[in-house]
Amino acid sequence: MLVATTIMGLAIVGLMAGLSGATRNASRLRDYDRVVQLARLRMNDILADPKAPRNTLMQGVFPPELVGGLQSGWRGTVTLAEKTPLGGLGAFSLDRVQVDVWWISNGQRRTLSLESYRKRELGQTDTE
């Protein structure tokens, strides 16, 4: 009976250690999934805004209630990637949009970067 109890105790300790590791991994993946969704949201906001300033650093912090208590924020830039050589009617530029989202996980700062491009018609105020 003593041997059976010892074996059962060791099995339970092994199971608990495995469950603890699985819980940690699930928490880490949940945080990463939230951050990916926030990065996509911020990227879509910038891509949809034709008046987003170029060559200017945009940044902010996400509200803790939006990210489940995670300390996190973002940084974004829009830069000129390419421009049609001739101006006039139908001239356009290709803007490069980069969004970096950071978050603190287990006391360590982590970062996720997204990059995209958008076509934008040049207006009369565009001198670049």
Image (spheres, rainbow, N blue to C red):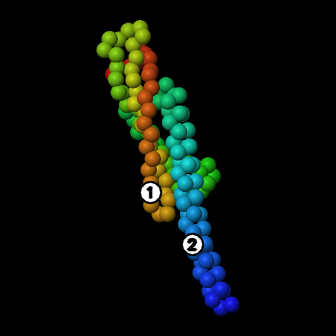
Residue pointed to by mark 2: 17
Residue situated in front as seen by the camera: 79 or 112: 112
Taking the view exactly as shown, the residue that stands out farthest to the bottom is 2
**Residue at 49%, 53% in the rendered image:** 103
Residue situated in front as seen by the camera: 1 or 23: 1
Q: Is residue 105 left or right of residue 128?
A: right
User: In this rendering, is residue 127 above or below 1?
Assistant: above
Q: Amino acid at mark 2?
A: Ala
**Residue at 59%, 81% in the rendered image:** 10
In the rendered structure, are the residues bearing label 2 and label 1 in contact, judged by CB atoms less than 8 Å apart? no
User: In this rendering, is residue 25 above or below 6?
Assistant: above
Q: Label 1: state its secondary structure.
A: strand
Image coordinates of residue 2 in percent, x first then y, are 65, 91
Residue 115 seen: yes
Taking the view exactly as shown, the residue that stands out farthest to the right is 1
Q: Which mark is residue 109?
A: 1
- Label 2 crowd bin: few (<14), some (14–19), many (20+), radius 10 Å: few
